[in-house]
Image: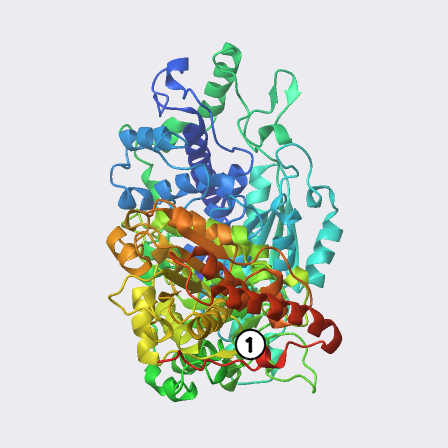
Amino acid sequence: MSRSDATSSYSPADLDLDLRWWAAANYLTVGQIYLRENALLRESLTLDHVKPRLLGHWGTSPGLSMIYALLNRVIRETGSQWLYVTGPGHGGPALVAAAWLEGTYTEVYPHVGDDADGIRTLFRQFSSPRGVPSHVSVQTPGSIHEGGELGYALAHAAGAVFDHPDLLVACVVGDGEAETGPLSASWRLPSFLNPRRDGAVLPIIHLNGYKIAGPTVLGRTSDDDVEAYLRSQGWDPVTVAGDDPREVFPALLKALRDSHAAIRGLQETARAGDGPSEAVRHAWPAVVLRTPKGWTGPDVVDGVQVEGTNLSHQVPLSGLADDPGHLRLLEEWLRGYGPESLFDEDGRLAPELRALAPEGDLRMSATPYANGGRLREELPMPDLTAHETEVDVTQRGVSLVENTITAGRLMRDLYAATTRPDGGGIFRLFSPDETASNRLQPVFEVTDRCFTGPLLETDQQIGPDGRVMEVLSEHLCEGWLEGYLLTGRHGLFATYEAFAMVSASMAVQHVKWLQHAQTLPWRASVSSLNVLLTSTCWRNDHNGFSHQGPGLIDSLIPLAPDVVRVWLPPDANTTLSITDHCLRSTDHVNLIVVDKQKHLQYLTLEEAHRHCARGAGAWDWASTADPDETPDVVLACAGDVPTQEALAAAELLAEHVPELRFRFVNVVDLMALLPEADHPHGYTDSQFDDLFTADRHVVMAFHGYPRAVHQLVHGRSNPGRFHVRGFNEQGTTTTPFDMVVLNRMSRFHLAKEVLRRCSTRPRGWRELTALCDRRLAEHEAFIPEQLVDLPDIDDWTWRGLPT
């Protein structure tokens, strides 16, 4: 049979084979939920064969398995590469079953064999203590998307196909998931997908009508209205519906074949030559699939309709110990799939069904795209010394530079070095309409913003071939980047600090994914998720209280120490050094917090490298105590604005109380504050005490909420000696210095706190305290009238300490 014939036919014999494979997948799915023994029903089912705790989700699983079976047929016919993303993440047993049927599961986990003993192990481990989760988790071969927190399937699928021109992603969107905000935003993908250099996503909206306890919105929406909505977003949908497998299977296979042909046709047209930009604008195929929830499961239980209702969402038959009738129904349900015809005497899958799987890496459970570290290439990181002359530190604390501009220049060089002839690459920047606002605009010297929609003559630095991804949704930026990284590439997500909390739970979920991935030898390392937070709480001159919130730091620091890193660079060179380090790293979530506005510059690039490698260190040039001297007090800081205020406080102290011996400490790696046993970057107790002393008070200016530092130093020697000034939820549209005054982190507040906490009161302490109070009163009177900060505050630069 020719390939054209194969792709247009579906013989009764082929249909029978696919239905049998589907029955095997459904049998294994039900078995995972219910059975711990008698896995192949070689004897009558008894209560002893059933798990004591019945956990899992049946309702969505039959639909997921049907789609999987038919995609396998398309893959075998076309040789195309597909990744399967399942939004209904609780369909975990269906995807585990598919991976076992394809042989991948046994390859990855040899203790789960391809025979009866393997099936028994497969069943016993599911949702069991020390077993595997019920979601399509990191432990599931072929998965890049767990689906526990709903809403991100289509965003992950999109990130996967950016710059992967040969990849197709079948993204199943559950109708419950379709009600979430992130998923609703994800339908805008056609405005950002370029068929010249990208792969394609085929959304399959699985409308089985119900969530866990009630109907879904799209499930109760007409086909015409669902299709109309998708068309308005740039999709070309087709609906497949029914409850008879012998009718639904051929209809869905035709939809999948037609979608594949349409996608390849669009890509071939777009790739035929340079052509006009119109070549990348078109509607992409989509499938709307309506099948019963809990399809092929128990129809009616105890006189109540179950199949096709929300009652089939999780475990349709429960209370087996109390109702022998339910146990009989379970056995009838399982035997209805005909396991004796699916597995041989040894429990191995029938050869004709095993042959339905694609070969090798074309199996969706074995695709390298779902194990992105196999595809990952190292970034060609440029020599950073070329950037050194762009930041003047011939005199410390005098020149003003936008702290994020160096990161923008580094990413510009990476774009230039990694762009392929087809316009694709291995690096992208994601940002919600804030690239230039966050001073990362050097990237526009080599690429534009991506937009495949209509263009106007007035548009600048925007077009279909651009590879800076700007979309006004933190969820999409985070989700796109996660999908991009998990399929083998590199990137960074930059956003305003306060609004990173919009996608904070996504970052938390990604940390959990990486945490478990590190325990799986078969999962290859992927590039780190790098999040750059700027427009910080301290410098939002024209934005108000709503834009002031450093909470993402607090969200991440309690999480997996092998994954999380939090960086607070004080100037542009440390920002450059940290960005370079983070882009080289793997398997981490790196949070970089630094302001975009102009700041004073302190360290040369070489000094920045050494300081960042240490994570924290004493700045002897800002200290009055000698390096080998025990100081009277430690003045510490973490973050750019806190560093400036702490340096200004140091200058006040050195001038007015010269007898006071203080050590100035800057912390750039926040996790260094943790004990060595709690984090790989944590200082040993001796290192910590060498830096902060063992018994002296520490006054610290901190970028975020003070409680974060107290949490980190808990367990250190006398942690109560740390006195932290930071953001205390005081903010408004005001001047930069007024922000630090409102939160009691100004140089005057810090100097007074040092005087309060030092081991001995130096001569002149009363006079300096009074001076600080007078300056704060002067500030309070000045800014309401003049609307700006006091000139000597606004123009302050580091003069150095008296010798």
Foreground pick, 676 / 380: 676
Give the quadrant of residue 738: bottom right
Q: Is residue 318 above or below residue 182?
A: above
Q: Is residue 795 above or below residue 592?
A: below
Which residue appears at 44% of the width and 25% of the height? Answer: 34
| Image position, residue 541 (x, y; %) | 65, 72
Q: Quadrant of the N terminus?
A: bottom left
Position of 9 with respect to 513 (left or right) is right
| Image position, residue 453 (x, y; %) | 65, 74
Is residue 72 visible in this depiction of the protein?
no
Tag 1: Cα neighbours inside 10 Å, few (<14), some, or many (≥20)?
many
Task: Specify the amino acid type for callout 1.
Answer: Gln
Assign a secondary structure to mark 1: loop
| Image position, residue 483 (x, y; %) | 47, 59
Which residue appears at 65% of the width and 16% of the height? Answer: 303
Q: Quadrant of the C terminus?
A: bottom left
Is residue 161 visible in this depiction of the protein?
yes
| Image position, residue 519 (x, y; %) | 30, 46
Residue bearing mark 1: 597
Position of 12 with respect to 732 (left or right) is left
Foreground pick, 356 / 442: 442
Position of 141 with respect to 685 (left or right) is right
Q: Is residue 227 above or below residue 660?
A: above
Foreground pick, 571 / 138: 571
Which residue appears at 57% of the width and 56% of the height? Answer: 501
Which residue appears at 53% of the width and 83% of the height? Answer: 444
Position of 378 with respect to 84 (left or right) is left
